[in-house]
Amino acid sequence: MYDIPINRGMESIRMPVQKDAHRIEEPDICPECKSSDLKFDSQKAEISCRRCGYVLEDSIVDLGQEWRAFNHEQRAKRTRVGAPATPAIADKGLPTEMGKSNRDINGRSIPERNRFQYNRLRKLNKRMRISGTGERNLAIALSELDRQSSRLGLPRSVREDAAIIYRSSAKKNLVRGRSIEGMVAASIYTAARRCNLPRTLDEVSEASNVKKKQIGKNYRFIARELSIKLKPTSPADYVPRFASVLGLSGEIESKAINIINQSKEQGLLTGREPTGVAAATLYIASMLLGVRVTQKDVAEIANVSEVTIRNRYKEFCEKLNLSAF
DNA sequence: AAGACGAAAGTGGTTGA
DNA sequence: TCAACAACTTTCGTCTT
């Protein structure tokens, strides 16, 4: 029933690493004049011959780090590997953990009589990480957020934005008295719109099992309390997604967006469902470019009826003089 | 036979008294 | 709270390819 949340921050990429890969292999003699008097210019990143000026290598890329560290502390501070901190995990992906080995920081073994104390500390530290009801609710909410957004196929950026929105509303005590699922759904809806990758209330409702009406209500509440101001969604934002589901080309996509812009100028879009408009323009665009799609297919993916597609299509053709058929 | 078309009746949400 | 309303849906018969 539930998707298991995957902590993507911990995914690692394995690549073969050559030993001393960043060391530049310096040629020792010039192929032109056979002189061994070569010059390495670190500013221009090239190796040239001092005698004849022949450039042996250019655009050399130094794969090493640009910093140096003289002790452990500096190294820890300057090194940049590891998962980035993310708002989508309860502790932002930066937990503190006490190591399991019974050795202190200097590598000395911890005396037997203190072992019990250390075990106890380790246990407490683990518990403290998700402490208090607030933190615990946040952890629940964020796993719910992950579940819902993967159902909606939202990219990481939107998830993180949704997490930020949820965190701010939790901070402002907006969640009290409302269901976590409902607030998470509203955060996702808001974030998706803000990132110009809108999902309809129907879609979010489907993914979250929260009533459409409730999500709308929560959305307005969040938008008001956090003063998030969003323009009404443009049909153009739906076009790329619909087009890719229908397997339509980029040419058709841009044609459809073109039609949307023209209709906007003529004020044909006010009060019309953006999804219906997006679907209808995609239909028109593919007809104009000679690609056959059925009204039924287009209507289905936009979750509108065929009749709506026909109505939009009729309107646009009349008002924009698109009499190609 | 599948798809397009359009009329007519029904539905759910918004608006204004 | 309720009626009016616009947008949209469902249904169905007819036409076109």
Image (cartoon, coloured by chain):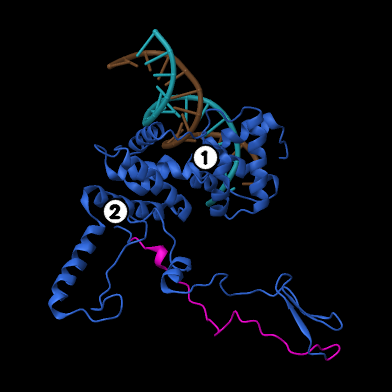
Chain colours: A blue, B cyan, C brown
- Frontmost residue, A322 versus A30: A30
Closest to the camera, between mark 1 and mark 2, is 2
Q: What residue is rendered at 13% in x and 73% in y?
A: A116
Q: What residue is rendered at 39% in x and 49% in y?
A: A163
Q: With A187 as the anchor, is C6 left or right in this view?
A: right
- Asked if A31 appears above or below A202 in the picture, the reply is below
Residue at far front of view: A70
Task: Residue A103: name its quadrant.
Answer: bottom left
What residue range appears in magenta?
A5-34
Residue under numbered circle 1: A275
- Asked if A228 appears above or below A145 in the picture, the reply is above
Badge 2: chain ID: A
Is residue A310 in the magenta section? no
- Dividing the image into 4 quarters, which one contains the N terminus of chain A? bottom left
- Return the x and y of residue A64 as percentages of the image width and height: 58, 75
- Frontmost residue, A20 versus A266: A20
